[in-house]
Amino acid sequence: MGVITDTSWMIGGPQGSGVDSSATLFARSMAVAGYWVYGKREYHSNIKGAHSYFHLRVKTTPVRSHIDPIHLLSTFEDSTAEIHAHEIVAGGALIYDPSVTKPETLEMDASVKLFPIEFETIIRDLAEELGKPAAKLAIVKNTIAVAASLALYGVGLDVLEEALKGLFRGKKAGLVGVNLAAGKKAYQVIQSVEGWDTFAYRLAPQTNKPEPNSRLLMNGAAACGIGKLKAGCRFQTYYSITPAVDECIWLEQQTEYGIVVYQAEDEIASINMANGAAYTGARTSTATSGPGFCLKAEGIGWAGMNEVPTVITNYQRGGPSTGLPTRNEQGDLLFALNIGHGDFPRIVVASGDMEECFEDGFNAFNFAERYQTPTILLIDKALANSTQTIPKFAEKHLRIDRGQIVGAPESFNPEDPATGLPKFNRFKVTESGISPRSLPGTPGRIHFLTGDEHTEYGVITEKPEIRIAMMDKRDRKLHTAAREIPQDLQFKLYGPEQADITIVGWGSSKGIIIDALDELKAQGVTANYLHIRLMSPFPAEKVAEILTNAKKTMIIESNFSNQLAKVIKMETGITIPHHVAKYTGRPISQCEAVSAVQEVLTKNSRKVMLSCGH
Amino acid sequence: MATKQQQLPTLATKVKPFQLKSEKPIDWCPGCGDFGIVNAVQQAVSELGLVPWKVNFFTGIGCSGKSSQYLQAYGVHTLHGRVLPYALGSKIVNPDNVVLAAGGDGDGYGIGGGHFLHAGRRNVDITYIVFNNEVYGLTKGQASPTLEVGMQPKSLALPHISQSINPLALAIAAGYTFVARSYSFDAKHLKQTIMAAIEHRGISLVDVHQPCPTYNDLHPKEYYSEKVIENGTEMPRVYYLDDTDYNGVVADSTDAEAVNAKKIEAIERAYKREERIALGVYWKIDMPTYEDRLQSVIPALQGTSPITIPFHDEDMIPTTDLSYAYEEFLV
Ligand SMILES: Cc1ncc(C[n+]2csc(CCOP(=O)(O)OP(=O)(O)O)c2C)c(N)n1
Ligand code: SF4
Ligand SMILES: [Mg+2]
């Protein structure tokens, strides 16, 4: 019987060899067994050949981050063991193909247990039994590697069967049998190895098993997509770019909902089509990443000037330029806050985990329509591509807010077209800054939009007094938003109110730091975490209050220049003295976060640079 | 896929062109060809009996771009070169509106060149009017992509050394389903061409020769009304394709070979070198629109449109049932 409640598993291989599907099968199996899973995906900007891997953590309780050491490394080709064997902990295990991997040549702890699997033999036997050509069965290698791992962890074959059924549905149901047969053979091989059942990281059985089908296993891109669907998003434009394309493709598959996903000729078309559709009255968004976000600058400014409710999701990846196209970074915060020339209000929200991706994906349209201004969602690649088991999203509390939309005025008489023609002061100067909006097609509410400065009717003007009135009016919307947006959507303090140290962070750092708080507590450190979610309008007053009352403050961010620290300084005047930064493109691990906090506490380091991860 | 009939939102009592003039004073130079185009748009909307508040007029940036401020309909002055993306996005989500787009030759064929090409591939049901004056009017007369090589209007420091594009041939090749040429001071022809373009179901291009008296001294109004000598006879500069035996309309769009032959003929016509200028429809074909194709791949859109599918109840509670979307993630 295992006693381990928290384990780390990795599978790797050349891109295109099925690493992703292996990881999905493993994660599903563990979820079926009732465990909680967090998996991060690392890949190159390449289609076939370059090394990619999936690093999964399995726990008996909810998990939101990865740890660096590997307890079980599962491989079906030579490169993964060569690259990652040295990361296996003492007492960990390696599953490998003896025909391509020679353990004696690997740099690896001597206590690592070896589990050779002759993949070719299994496949050959299977081919004979099923009367199928062996070449056609090569793909079950992935299943063999997963099944062998499950066996070692003490997870039953019935779980694998259930997971396979979940994975291969509908037209693909026929694949369950072959894969299960291959899995059985893998179990037999593992169980024939001396000492297999004393593997040091054999998992404790899950006693507190969640109801089947009560949870979701998904990544941040899909979570945001689901939030958009719930919000009634009917038009999403994009131009293909990693990692934003995942959300778009997923949305395109949801044909039940009548959403149109439009692959435009470029990102400029994407933002401007989105503006056109949002103005027309459809809930509309566009999704992109760094380079594409740059191209959208002018269009976002137009939406700001014309008070059009366009939602822009920017999936952050390593910059500048093409940068690290498939890797993580939180490098676009300052850019998002300033994108576009001139001054205009924009709402910027940075999601921190799956639930926030869902909620923000939903709320973005409410914000955009209520405040009639572009709303930017920032999601980092680490969130977009990580898979996690989560409870089903709470939906009951959600409400649609379309802001002020007006229909035909009472004076309109359908018999008399002249009554449909009067102009409408779409940009009426109001105290809240928000003006009633009419959608094209509405009689009696004709008005103009223009990127030039304009009057209440949308007519071009350069009059100084109107300029002042309009700039002020648009700006007031942001103050209204700051007052109205519920505080728990703006920021949140996790952990004890009083702590030795307050860690500030945003985006995907949330899960890592929250997981790290427990570990720190075990090490005798009381820390709390200030998570900032609403970046514009920035909750300056409240954040200042928390920081001023904190004993010691530090910030952890996945970017070069600690952009959130700069924003806090700009908005509150407060300097956070200890900066932890990571810009290798690899997400921060729980271990890194814990040791960074310890380093700040013990050495008082001003700058800590993190670099774990291949 | 069968092609459908155009259904325009019309009024029982037509509004008069003067009712379609906005209050904004026009600030184009005296004698500018742009006046003629805006007048023709007002006339066309009036004569077709269109519901003015269902007309959505998108324009680019330039002298021409200001047109959307002068028509009493929903008017959107977009960004330089981006008028087509706005117009397409709007029409796709709400096909009930009549979408007109307009802009300069620099706007559409220059900075917006990419959108110009790709709009052809989609065949969204909109009408696009290009003000072709061979210059960038609003930035004081630099060369536009339609200015021929070797030309030097007075606003250019040096003779133009880049080749010009042929917008009609380009549009036909890109997939536009209605391609016509008109002239801004030929009020009747221009109005009729715009009306035909609006009535065409699919994307229409109307390239309008437009004198810019301020910067383009090579092709002022007088140039267009001049006589030219052709085969020893004096002929008017501007003439009509309708008066020739050329017919650019594809009779049967399902006959691929005939369509190709016609397309080549139309491109050839667009490239015809002559001193004279032929106005009229160079190419017209009835084909399924983007909106039709969308409905064929997204059954949920059949008989409705993105903007009309409800997503909340009276209490603003979202009505979207996520169970279909959740299915693949449940564990
Ligand atoms: C992105 C961008 N670049 C440049 C400009 C400056 N600009 C304004 S109008 C114009 C050219 C207008 O020429 P055209 O489109 O032919 O219209 P016309 O004025 O001739 O009607 C330019 C370059 C701009 N507004 N936006
Ligand atoms: S510059 Fe030319 S195109 Fe512009 S308004 Fe004057 S005449 Fe017309
Ligand atoms: Mg021009």
Image (tube, coloured by chain):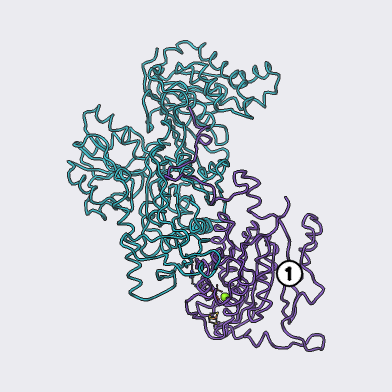
Chain colours: A cyan, B purple
Percent of width and height locating residue B250: 77, 62
- A50 vs A90, left or right, is right
Instruction: Say which residue appears at 25% left-offset and 53% top-offset.
Output: A569
Q: Nearer the viewer, residue A585 or B54?
A: B54
Q: How many numbered discs, if any?
A: 1
Pointer 1 residue: B282
Disc 1 chain ID: B
- B142 vs A375, left or right, is right
Asked which secondary structure carries label 1, the reply is strand
Mark 1 residue CB less than 8 A from any atom of ligand 3: no
Q: Is B326 rendered above or below residue A196?
A: below
Q: Is B74 rendered above or below residue A99?
A: below
Q: Is A487 rendered above or below residue A456?
A: above
Percent of width and height locating residue A578: 24, 44
Q: Nearer the viewer, residue B109 or A582?
A: B109
Q: Nearer the viewer, residue B107 or B63?
A: B63
Badge 1 density bin: few <14, some 14–19, many ≥20, Cα 10 Å: many
Q: Nearer the viewer, residue B304 or A5?
A: B304
Percent of width and height locating residue A250: 53, 41
Instruction: Say which residue appears at 53% left-offset and 28% top-offset.
Output: A22
Quarter occupied by residue A489: top left
Q: Where in the image, quadrant-wise, is ligand 3 located?
A: bottom right
Tell me the kind of residue under disc 1.
Answer: Tyr
Quarter occupied by residue B166: bottom right
Percent of width and height locating residue A112: 42, 20
